[in-house]
Amino acid sequence: MSPGTTSGRPLVDRTGLSGKFDFNLEWTPVTNGQAKPGEAPPDEAGLTFEEALRQQLGFKLESQKVPIPVLVLDHVERPSQN
């Protein structure tokens, strides 16, 4: 599982698994309940991302506070014309 975000929080890989894996994960994205013009209405009965991880891959997301590296840019300038 690669680093990413869900529920607005960072994901930290603590599976202990290494290497590359090929799998299909079927889940229903969370929407505001409205379809865009020309699209089918969202399937509210589908699995959430967290449910799909647990049921299909056996992974469980746990909320924890851990240190993560963060890059902060506090000032940016255009390069000078040498």
Image: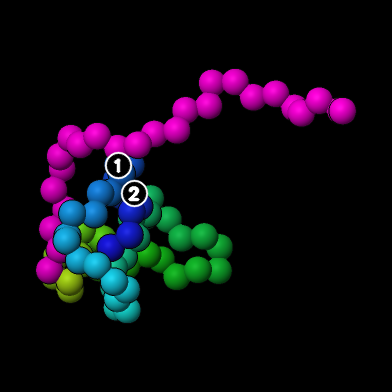
Residue 72: image location, x then y, percent? 47, 28
Q: Nearer the viewer, residue 74 or 39?
A: 74
Q: Is residue 23 magenta?
A: no
Q: In the rendered view, tell whether residue 47 sits above or below residue 77.
A: below
Residue appearing at x 20%, y 66% in the figure: 17
- Which label was assigned to residue 5? 2
| Image coordinates for residue 12, horizontal then vertical, percent | 25, 49
Tell me if mark 2 has few (under 14), some (14-19) or many (20+) residues whose alpha carbon lies within 10 angstroms of its own.
Answer: few
Residue contact at pointers 1 and 2, CB within 8 angstroms: yes
Q: In the image, which residues are magenta?
A: 58-82
Placement of the N terminus among the 4 image quadrants: bottom left
Left or right: residue 53 compared with residue 39: left
- Picture quarter with the C terminus: top right
- Left or right: residue 64 versus residue 31 is left
Mark 2 residue type: Thr
Residue closest to the eye, 11 or 38: 11
Q: Is residue 73 shown above or below 16?
A: above
User: In the image, residue 4 lies at what x, y percent?
Assistant: 35, 52
Residue for point 13% across, 48% down: 62
How many angstroms separate mark 1 from mark 2 (CA)? 5 Å
The residue that disc 1 covers is 9
Q: Position of residue 20 (x, y in %)?
A: 32, 73
